[in-house]
Every structure is written in structure tokens, then in C-alpha cells.
Amino acid sequence: MKNTFGSALALTIFGESHGRAIGSVLDGMAAGVPVDEEFIAACMDKRRARGDGLSTPRVEADNVQLLSGVVNGHTTGTAIALMIENQNTRSGDYAKTADLLRPGHADYTAYAKYHGFQDARGGGHFSGRITAALVAGGAIVLGALNRAGIDITTHIARCAGISDTPFALDDAAALAAQVSVLESRDEGFALLDASVEEAMKTAIRAAGSEGDSVGGILETAILGLPAGVGEPYFDSVESLISHMAFSVPAVKGIEFGTGFGFADLKGSEANDAFRMKGDSVVTATNHNAGINGGITNGMPVVFRTAVKPTPSIYKEQETVDYIAKQDAPLSIQGRHDPCIVPRAAIVQTCAAALAVGDLMTARYGTAWMERPTSYRREGL
């Protein structure tokens, strides 16, 4: 099992849903980078369950302990270890169904790979609980990117069949205003159009009351990436962002810019015409989401991810008892989210931050962290 993402800037995650703790190790940060613990806590709070009928009744404090790599609010240049204690576990909820494969979960694939030695309590290492460790490490990188003039944010584009206002893909100024609005809000329900919030929440609660769940679509915007970041083919911007996007449990699809809509366009409609804006090269449209040939062109990067409905539902389902090797009914116990889309928004933001941080470090070394306001003028 490999639990590390990144080459120039790497994050390793560890822990299980019902173990003593989960956490991450961030390696590759320069020395002297400010670490804002209040910002980390704010990111964690957006992911945290609230027991409000919209998320799991399992409410954890999610206090992040910085074990190493940070002294007096700044990085030391060594590996940053972060730990989050699991304080609200109920492993007994899973005892009666331990031999039953939960549809939509990794129970069978984990058994096939790890031969029964995996920690199955609460989904173990496959649980969405582990995304707390991803957010903790990703928030540090996100803060560093913000200081370098790179903003990343995510909103709920669609949930339970109800849509929010989409990002203004072809209008960079309007998109920047939308990002500013989202970043100014502290709540975990990230929407541009507040008028659809209650309808979404009602649909989520209705699914939960029926013992069911709903999914949705997240839309992420990355502003301020300079042109020239990324590689062709295997380490393209799309490749690394997708790598991290699919590391968020329940994500089953991704598209950049116009995405699958390209299938219905002609080349004359799909191409983004270049033009000058002062001394800068920009594009008149942004169908390609700021990426050409796997490398950034300086325009905003926008992508959408499809999030499947939470597989843990209370309705009776058909499955198999893999120990007795026979078909069996399953009624899932435990505490689960009727929808993970709202909580997953900050997770996707931090996942994107880790991918962008790795891309930036591959391109500029640690200069973008050490000299965030001047690295672009240094001719690197």
C-alpha cells in the first residue's frame, strides 16, 4: 500500500477510521514559511460533521496537533507531522455485519488485496474520515499558495438535482469576484446562490429520513497560476489534479473547462483565441480551463468532479456473506452522511492545493514559498 502523493512536495497519510488517530506528513516545504493554525482550524471546521441531519452524527473535534516541522508559527524545513485523534468511535456498530460486503464500499476489494488483515472498522483506511488528514496537510500548502497569489476554492455546483450558479469560465474578472465571495464565507455549505441552499438541505434531509443518500457535483477554481507550470503527457496539470481529485473518496468523474461538452462543438467553437491584454497573453474564451498541452497558459483552471451518493445507506440491500460464501441481506448500522458533497468541497480544495503545490515546486523549487511576492520576477 502506497500512501504518498507528490514528488517535489509530498503528502503521506496514515491511520484508520476507528484507530487511535489519523494524520499526515508533509515533506518538501521550505524553511520559514508561515503556518497559520487558525486557518488550518477553519479548513477543518468546513469538513467537520455537525450532527444536523445533513452529515454524520459522528461529530469529532478534529483538533490538529502539529508534532514536528513547525516552530514559532513557521516551518523549519523538515517534515511536518500532523495528527488528529479519533475521539468518537463506535466499532460495535459493525460487529454484526462484519462478514457482509457493503455494496459501494471497498470491503471486497480490500479483502481481495489484504487477505483479511485490513482494519474493517468503519471502513478502516478507506473511510472518508481519512480526508481530515488530507485537509490538515493541504491547508498548509493552500495557505502558502494564497501568499503567492494563487487562490483555490470549491463550491457545490449541483446536489440532489439542484444547481448552484456555475463559475464564470470565460470571464476571469467575474470568476475572481465569485471566488472572493466564497472565500469570505466561513460556513461549510459553499454556494454562490444562497437562494438554493434550503432546497438542497431539504433534499438531503429527505433522503436521510428515507434511509437513503444523494450525490452531486463540485466545481473548483484555481486563480493566479502563472503560465508555464506543468509537463506534457504523464505529469500534466490535468494528470496531477485528477490524481488528487480521485483520492477523495466517492469522486467518480472529472472534467476540465468545457469538458465533455467539447464532444458537441466544432473546432472553430472550441478553440480559445489568443489576444494581448497590456503586456500579457490571454484567451478570449477559456474552454480549455487554462491548460494547453498539459501546461498552464495563465488563465484560470476550472474543473468539476462528480461525487456519488454515500454508499452507507440504511435501506436493506442484497449482498454476500464472504465467509459463509452465500447470498445475504444487509441492513447497514453505524452513523453515516446522507450526503458528503458539502463536506467534500474543502477536501477537494485542499486536494487541488497539494497537486498545485507539487507542480509549483517542480517548476520553481521552493522559491514560490520563500519569496511569494517576487519569485515570478526572478526569471525562473
Image: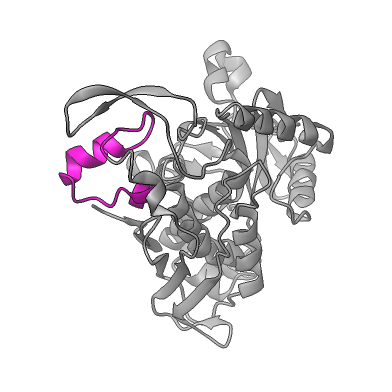
* Residue that appears at 58% across and 49% down: 57
* Residue that appears at 49% across and 65% down: 87
Image position, residue 70 (x, y; %): 50, 82
* Residue that appears at 35% across and 38% down: 233
Residue 157 in magenta?
no
Residue placed most toward the observer, 67 or 206 = 206
Image position, residue 344 (x, y; %): 57, 45
Image position, residue 167 (x, y; %): 71, 35
Residue 124 in magenta?
yes
Residue placed most toward the observer, 364 or 343 = 343
Residue 324 visible, this angle: yes
- 377 is higher (above) or lower (below) than 294: below
Segment colored magenta: 99-125
* Residue that appears at 62% across and 37% down: 219
- 102 is higher (above) or lower (below) than 127: above
Residue placed most toward the observer, 281 or 152 = 152
